Image (cartoon, grey):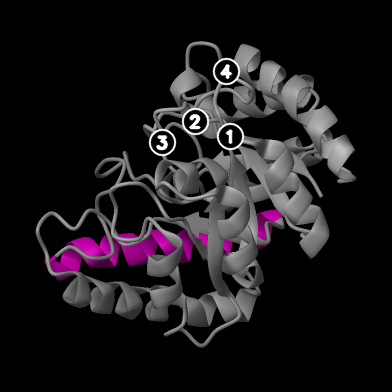
């Protein structure tokens, strides 16, 4: 199992600089943000992708995940979404996901993460869920061809936040390439016990995001150890179930001090992984 660090904490740096800094911190994995200022697909031709792959190899970094959640290059954190009424906007999200799948295949990543629909903004859940299923159905054939998993990430205040909502979504999909990017903090924010949620959703978990969250359960990512999440309980469940996927530390609020937050989190998490009997590279 590889513990990576997401480049979305390093948006004040180029992707090349971010990779260098993450490697220098002692990580052996990197989650790459598929958006500006990092790996926005239209900005990368084959030659530039080849240079990126060489840089990753030079620093002995595996790609734990391609994070195709945000689209600041053409929108914002959530938009364009899978469930907007405008079909052209929905197509932008679909096309972005297809591009990310192709890049994941080239870089040797096993999965990409995508947003769980989008903000409902007053829209009816059933109609929005139909649009989401339709959009996901358009990207799964390529995912199956490339053997890359499309992992939906439940998010506070979006269409899918909780275990029950994810189950409602995934049980209508017949593809092994669809799954969940299990963000430990997001389930804590939703009022759930992340360990229990992980056990319920384990068969679909393809990748894990890790960050801490305060006692208030407000959606504010914190360095590991600065919040209230019982990581030991979550890791014990991972060990019991035999989780073999990768984990990525996601600390995007720390753009002014990503190295300090990453080092602090690593120092807090490594002993907990060891106590749970989980070997982290």
Foreground pick, 281 / 274: 274
To which residue does mark 1 refer? 229
Query: Residues under labels 4 and 3: Cα distance?
Result: 17 Å
- Work out whether mark 1 precedes mark 4 in sequence or the reverse, and give the earlier one: 1
State the image coordinates of residue 129 (x, y, percent, origin top left).
Answer: 27, 74
Query: Residues under labels 1 and 4: Cα distance?
Result: 20 Å
Regarding residue 28, the answer to whether it shows in the image is: yes
Eyeballing the image, is 90 above or below 139?
Answer: above
Q: Residue at x 41, y 36 (%)?
A: 36
Closest to the camera, between mark 1 and mark 4, is: 1
Asked if labels 2 and 1 touch by Cβ distance under 8 angstroms, the answer is yes
Q: Residues within 10 Å of mark 4 (few under 14, many from 20)?
A: many
Q: Residue at x 63, y 52 (%)?
A: 195
To which residue does mark 4 refer? 258
- Work out whether mark 3 precedes mark 2 in sequence or the reverse, and give the earlier one: 3
Asked if labels 4 and 1 touch by Cβ distance under 8 angstroms, the answer is no
Name the secondary structure under disc 1: loop
Name the secondary structure under disc 2: loop
Q: Looking at the rendered structure, which numbered label has been put on residue 213?
A: 2
Q: Which residues are magenta?
A: 85-107
Query: Residues under labels 4 and 2: Cα distance?
Result: 17 Å
Q: Main secondary structure of the magenta part?
A: helix
Eyeballing the image, is 215 above or below 231?
Answer: above
Asked if labels 1 and 3 touch by Cβ distance under 8 angstroms, the answer is no
To which residue does mark 3 refer? 36
Closest to the camera, between mark 3 and mark 1, is: 1
Q: Residues within 10 Å of mark 2 (few under 14, many from 20)?
A: many
Q: Quadrant of the C terminus?
A: top right
């Amino acid at each position: 199992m590889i513990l990576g660090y997401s480049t979305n904490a390093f948006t004040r740096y180029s992707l090349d600089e971010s990779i260098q800094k993450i490697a220098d911190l002692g990580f052996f994995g990197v989650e790459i943000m598929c958006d500006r200022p990092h790996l926005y697909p239209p900005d990368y031709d084959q030659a530039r992708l080849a240079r990126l792959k060489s840089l990753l190899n030079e620093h002995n970094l595996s790609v734990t995940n391609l994070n195709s959640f945000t689209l600041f290059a053409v929108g914002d954190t959530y938009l364009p979404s899978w469930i907007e009424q405008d079909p052209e906007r929905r197509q932008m999200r679909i096309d972005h996901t297809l591009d990310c799948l192709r890049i994941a295949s080239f870089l040797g990543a096993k999965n990409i993460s995508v947003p769980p629909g989008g903000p409902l903004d007053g829209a009816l859940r059933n109609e929005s869920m139909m649009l989401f299923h339709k959009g996901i159905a358009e990207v799964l054939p390529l995912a199956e061809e490339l053997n890359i998993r499309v992992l939906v990430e439940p998010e506070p205040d979006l269409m899918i936040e909780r275990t029950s909502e994810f189950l409602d979504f995934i049980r209508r999909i017949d593809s092994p390439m669809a799954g969940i990017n299990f963000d430990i903090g997001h389930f804590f924010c939703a009022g759930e016990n992340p360990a229990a949620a992980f056990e319920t959703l384990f068969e679909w978990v393809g990748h894990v995001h890790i960050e801490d969250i305060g006692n208030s359960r407000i959606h504010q990512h914190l360095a590991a150890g600065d919040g209230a999440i019982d990581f030991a309980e979550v890791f014990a469940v991972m060990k019991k179930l035999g989780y073999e996927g990768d984990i990525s530390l996601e600390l995007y609020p720390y753009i002014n001090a990503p190295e300090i937050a990453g080092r602090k989190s690593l120092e807090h998490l490594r002993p907990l992984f060891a106590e749970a009997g989980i070997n982290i590279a």
